[in-house]
Image (spheres, rainbow, N blue to C red):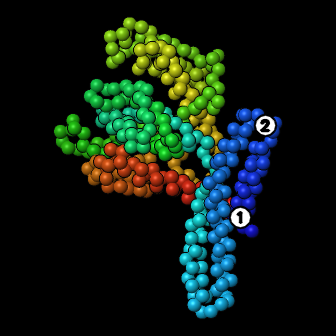
Amino acid sequence: MNGLDHKLERVVARHEELRHAMTAADMDARQFAKLSKEYADLEPLVGAITTLRKLRVELDGLKTMMGEGDAEMKALAEQEYFALKDKLPEMEKQLQIMLLPKDAADEKNAILEVRAGTGGDEAALFAAELFRMYQRYAALHGWRFEIMEIAETGIGGYKEAIANISGRGVFARLKFESGVHRVQRVPATEASGRIHTSAATVAVLPEAEDVDIKIEDKDLRIDVFRSSGPGGQSVNTTDSAVRITHLPTGIVVQQQDEKSQHKNKAKALKILRARLYEAERARAEAERAKNRKSQVGSGDRSERIRTYNFPQSRVTDHRINLTLYKIDKVISGEALDEIIDALIAEDMAARLAELPA
């Protein structure tokens, strides 16, 4: 029995063990919910294992038929044998992918933060373009895109923009977007037609629940002040804006989009919780990465991950050396899946290569 078969045996045994455990009379509701979730998570894997085992039994039967009977029967058995045998490696590979450890944050919603980097007004315009790209991408996937804060520059650019994206598998698809996005193009304000390079920083954080990150009141300093900027007549008449400082880490979050102090505080706490959770994940990932041969991007906000070259209609992801000549479709969100799918596939391939034989 090879290494894969040993793992498959353990999965089937655990699935059966859970089935018996859930029938225990003295089990409380919370424990039952936990076990039933694990049982349901293993269900597709056990189904795939059953299919593989049936295929192997069928192959053994055909192999026997190839050694006996008349010539016509042998020829038919041989033809079917090799047709089925070709399916085996792909089926085993799919099972190995299903066995890969899951990122606990993959099914979470996400906090998206886009900030203008080097490049002045042009960087702010590009940041706004990226933010709208993710907004359209979310709409294409049927996700909810809630704008939490936008700091505008006055010419249509964004110094900073934050959104809460919710839906199925949001973080799993967007987590590789964190890093520095660079743009090369001729700004509308450039009279000589020279190509400028500027950048924006994207951070995608898994939205954390209370159970993920416990924040103590004593660790917070909360300041309230009057909002500034757009927001209606009452914006400068009440102390509705909220600034929260997390004293142990020094992380500061500010919210002033809502007219209600309570709502601004709730939004700020949501962003703070996500940042603390991501910092914890980053520490754990750095520890794991010491032992990993490769990884698709570190998620580091200072890492340059992608270049958008408008004169050549080219988008290049530097982590996997993928270039698409369809910048308009990427920026509209339509072709972004082509890049994201390639990043997910590369990450899976890297993790499969690191599995012990």
Q: Which residue is mark 1?
A: 5
**Residue at 33% over, 38% down:** 129
Q: Quadrant of the N terminus?
A: bottom right
Question: The disc labelled 2 sits on which kind of residue?
Answer: Met
* Residue at x 39% of width, y 48% of height: 336
Q: Secondary structure at mark 2?
A: loop
Question: Residue 149 location, x and y as percent?
Answer: 41, 25
Q: Residue furthest left?
A: 191
Closer to the camera in the image, 188 or 229: 229
Decide which of tag 2 and tag 1 comes sooner along the chain.
1
Separation (CA) of disc 2 from disc 1: 32 Å
Asked whether residue 175 is in view, the answer is no
> SS of the residue at dot 1?
helix
Q: Is residue 91 left or right of residue 139?
A: right
Identify which residue, 51 or 230, lies in the foreground: 51
Q: Are marks 2 and 1 in contact (CB under 8 Å)?
A: no
In the rendered structure, the answer to whether residue 184 lies left or right of residue 322 reads: left
